[in-house]
Image: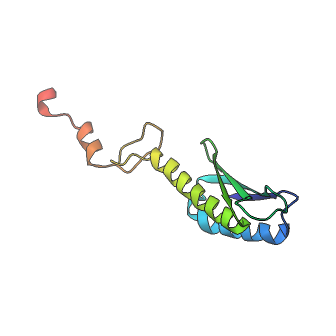
Amino acid sequence: MKIQVNTDDNVAGRESLARRVEAEVSRTLGHLSDHITRVEVHLSDEDSGKTGGNDKRCLMEARLAGRPPVAVTNHAESLGEAFGGAADKLKRSIERTLGRLKDHKGRVSIRGIEGPVGPQSDKAAVAPEADR
């Protein structure tokens, strides 16, 4: 999983911030890394120097293998809060997207993901004697 951090000109401490963001993305989304090819994080200060309000913004986009990208945005009073909220939103969104791909009864999903063989698939393979 590749992590790319982008900031606007109004964000201070880009290098140290980028390292912290990369570590947090790895920690938050690490268990999903088999499904994610790249995560892009965009941090910005929308009011550039003015105080107050939820003017810090974090946009996160995850590129999933073989799926459309998933993107979320979060606004907060600080970049840390904006990023933390966006990371949680992205994690839930990816988990929800990947959860839809699995068939909860153990059969092959129409979306192409195979599940474990369950009792339902065994019944379909053996026709009752009356049908033979």
Which x, y percent locates residue 92? 53, 56
Residue in the picture at 38% in, 51% down:
116
Q: How many numbered marks, from 0 up? A: 0
Colour mapping used in the image:
rainbow
Occupied quadrant, residue 89: bottom right
Residue 107 located left or right of residue 43: left
Residue drawn at 63 percent across, 53 percent down: 36
Q: Position of residue 78 (x, y in %)?
A: 72, 67
Please tell me whether residue 109 is drawn above or below residue 36 in the rendered image: above
Toward the viewer: 34 or 52? 52
Question: Which residue is located at x 40 percent, y 42 percent?
Answer: 108
Residue 127, quarter of picture: top left
Q: Which of the two residues, 3 or 90, is positioned nearer the viewer here?
A: 90
Q: Quadrant of the N terminus?
A: bottom right
Q: Check the image and name the residue furthest to the left.
A: 130
Among all residues in the image, which is located at the extreme top? 132
Name the quadrant of the C terminus.
Answer: top left
96 sits to left or right of 18 = left
Residue 62, how many percent across, how many down?
65, 51
Task: Judge from the rendering whether residue 120 lies leftward or rightward of residue 101; answer left or right.
Answer: left
Which residue does the image show at 22% across and 37% down from the upper left?
126
